[in-house]
Image (spheres, helix red, strand yellow):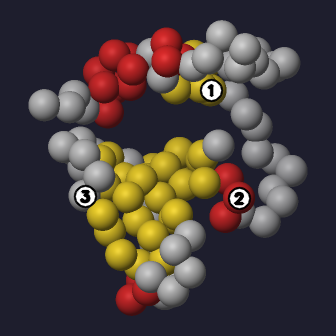
């Protein structure tokens, strides 16, 4: 699970972050000390998606959207209603892969 943190993201200890070019449209950031996944960033927009586990128990967080819904296993369901986006919708919004 992740949080859409937008494009204006500051990461403390940036000297400990390594960025991996994971696809034609996104890159992933990891801690060079412990290997923790810190974000994936959409190259075209600079949009940062960060794992919810990086944030301290913020009760105001709400699970409200799912992406790549067209690729999920049929047994995979959440109880609450969410905005659902297919892979094509994600690429249309954030930039298409080559």
Disc nearer the start of the sequence (1/3): 3
Q: Quadrant of the N terminus?
A: top right
| Residue at 49%, 18% in the rendered image | 71
Judged from the image, the secondary structure of the residue bearing numbered disc 2 is: helix
Classify 53 as above or below 6: below
| Residue at 22%, 28% in the rendered image | 96
Total marks shown come to: 3
Disc 2 from disc 3: Cα separation: 23 Å
Q: Residue 32: percent from the left, percent from the top? A: 44, 82
**Residue in front for this viewpoint, 78 or 35:** 35
Q: Residue 39: percent from the left, percent from the top? A: 47, 58
Q: Residue 48: percent from the left, percent from the top? A: 43, 53
Q: Quadrant of the C terminus?
A: top left
In the image, taking residue 96 as reference, residue 70 lies left or right, namely right
Disc 1 from disc 2: Cα separation: 17 Å
| Disc marking residue 53 | 2
Judged from the image, the secondary structure of the residue bearing numbered disc 3 is: loop
- Residues at marks 1 and 2 touching, judged by CB atoms closer than 8 Å: no
The residue labelled by disc 3 is 21
Classify 49 as above or below 28: above
Using a 10 Å C-alpha cutoff, classify the residue at mark 2 as few (fewer than 14 neighbours), some (14 to 19) or many (20 or more). few
Disc nearer the start of the sequence (2/3): 3
Disc 1 from disc 3: Cα separation: 25 Å
Classify 9 as above or below 84: below
**Residue in front for this viewpoint, 91 or 45:** 91
Q: Residue 63: percent from the left, percent from the top? A: 73, 34
| Residue at 67%, 53% in the rendered image | 52
The residue labelled by disc 1 is 65
Rendering quarter of residue 94: top left
- Residues at marks 2 and 3 touching, judged by CB atoms closer than 8 Å: no
């Amino acid at each position: 699970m992740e949080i859409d943190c937008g494009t204006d993201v500051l990461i403390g200890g940036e000297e400990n972050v390594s960025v991996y070019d994971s696809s034609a449209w996104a890159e992933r950031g990891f801690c060079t000390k412990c290997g923790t996944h810190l974000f994936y960033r959409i190259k075209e927009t600079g949009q940062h998606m960060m794992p919810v586990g990086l944030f301290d128990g913020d009760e105001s967080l709400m699970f409200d959207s799912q992406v790549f819904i067209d690729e999920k296993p049929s047994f995979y369901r959440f109880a609450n209603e969410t905005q659902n986006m297919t892979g094509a919708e994600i690429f249309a919004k954030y930039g298409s892969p080559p």
